[in-house]
Amino acid sequence: MSNTIPISTPRHLAKTPTGIYGIDEITAGGLPQGRPTLVAGSAGCGKTLLAMEFLVRGATLYDEPGVFVTFEETPEELVNNVASLGFDLDDLRERGLLWIEHIYLERSEIEEVGAYTLDGLFIRLEHAFDRIGAKRVALDTLEVLFSGLHDEALIRAELRRLFRWLKERGVTAVVTAERGDGTLTRHGLEEYVADCVIVLDHRVTSQLSTRRIRIVKYRGTMHGTNEYPFLIDQHGFTVFPITALGLDYNVGTERISTGVTGLDEMLGGSGYYKGSTILISGTAGTGKTSLSSAFAAAAYARNEHTLFVAFEESPAQIIRNVRSIGIDLEPAFTKECLHFHAVRPTLAGLELHLATITDQIARIKPSVVIIDPITSLISQGFNSEVRALFTRLIDFCKQHGITLLLTSLSVMGQDPEGTDIGVSSLVDTWLLVRNLEMHGKRNRGLYILKSRGMAHSNQIRKLVLSSEGISLIEIPSSSLQLSS
């Protein structure tokens, strides 16, 4: 008789893709097919929107009809509330892809008389499922069903019966519930009977709000367990699972122009590696934004899209200023090849800035991303937090083959070959621009501190910004004096 233990072939849990950006990534494919998923959170964290978008994306992307059961808002209110997100619920209803079942329950009119059951709800759900052949269902929110009731044993028994009934019907369900006191939900049971539990959170830190999502439990499958920032904007619900990125991206040997002929020459004649990360650091007025704009203009000449994240100047101001040095960004901006995202650092917390930038990248799909300057975000967190943010952003861009250019403002009197944030070790190419004193005049100078994987010049060159453009001029070392 053999003592070996037979090993069966692992079975993969069937999943229903949500179609919501980021959620399918952190759930490794979607929600459990034919099973209920609990979405818990406090008021205003996005539960209703997540449930509704699950149905809308299912109908529009996968041709799966859905039923939305609302206990609080009327169908008209739901239609109006999500219209700003681009969801046309009336059209989906007319096409038989969405059914909204409004069940009105007034707490003051509920009285505990005899045994309370959900049989009436089951009948209405069965009718709605049959009307459109529903594959998905959302119930929003669970607590209303039991408002005014005090028999906890009865409530828990009916909750178990509800989840079991949904499983028997084979529909993929999203059930929303309010957070409880010390428990995920008010009744403290739903998280034990649901196959997947998602918690939404809306917290305020230093007067700045951030929304986060976490998969607390997912039976039968691996899933992301971190907290992930998410946005609710005109595109709907967007989750950013970038904390899970590793060092497994591909690299190439293709080179792209910096937009400055002399700088291309200093970098071996061909410019930066495509998909690399570049840092330009220096004190105020040394030409960091000008070099960034030249790179954006070069991307436009290659018919590539650029996302320019500006924390200090408006798009109109940047376009006007660089026009004086022979760089015309207006055509690229007009033809929507150059996209600006100009905000003050104080607008949001670090996580929300990161989420917004990656959201822009996901929608624009640029080849080049410029952030000017990264040091503006120091006011929003500790240096270690800002470094962590840009570590994640650098990994995100490398994963997608995006060339990322960062500028960093150095403080007068500090070591110029250092950064407040400490991202210099993460970048592939590091340029330093600083002031020079030559023959009693103040000039700009540029040199390359490092450029991984390529031969590059060790010269300090005079950086000239004129109406003819940007040029780099060799200077004799005898006439050179660095200025702090």
Image (spheres, helix red, strand yellow):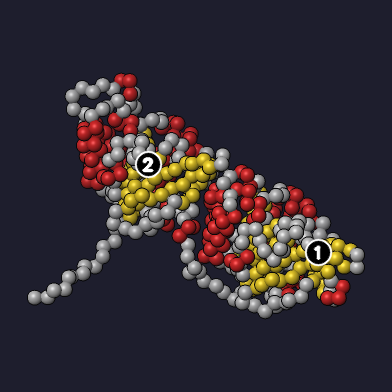
For disc 2, the neighbor class at 10 Å (few under 14, some 14 to 19, many from 20) is many
* Residue located 59% across and 76% down the image: 253
In the rendered image, the vertical position of residue 123 relative to residue 9, given as above or below: above
* Residue located 58% across and 66% down the image: 426
* Residue located 64% across and 56% down the image: 374
In the rendered picture of this protein, how many numbered marks are placed on residues?
A: 2
Residue 202 percent across, percent down from the top left: 47, 41
* Residue located 61% across and 77% down the image: 453
For disc 1, the neighbor class at 10 Å (few under 14, some 14 to 19, many from 20) is some
Is residue 290 or residue 423 the one in the foreground? Answer: 423
Which label's residue is closer to the chain start, 1 or 2? 2
Query: Which of the two discs, 1 and 2, sits closer to the camera?
Result: 1
Image quadrant holding the C terminus, namely: bottom right
Q: Secondary structure at mark 2?
A: strand
Q: Quadrant of residue 148?
A: top left
Residue 100 percent across, percent down from the top left: 37, 36
Residue 368 visible here: no
The residue that disc 1 covers is 483
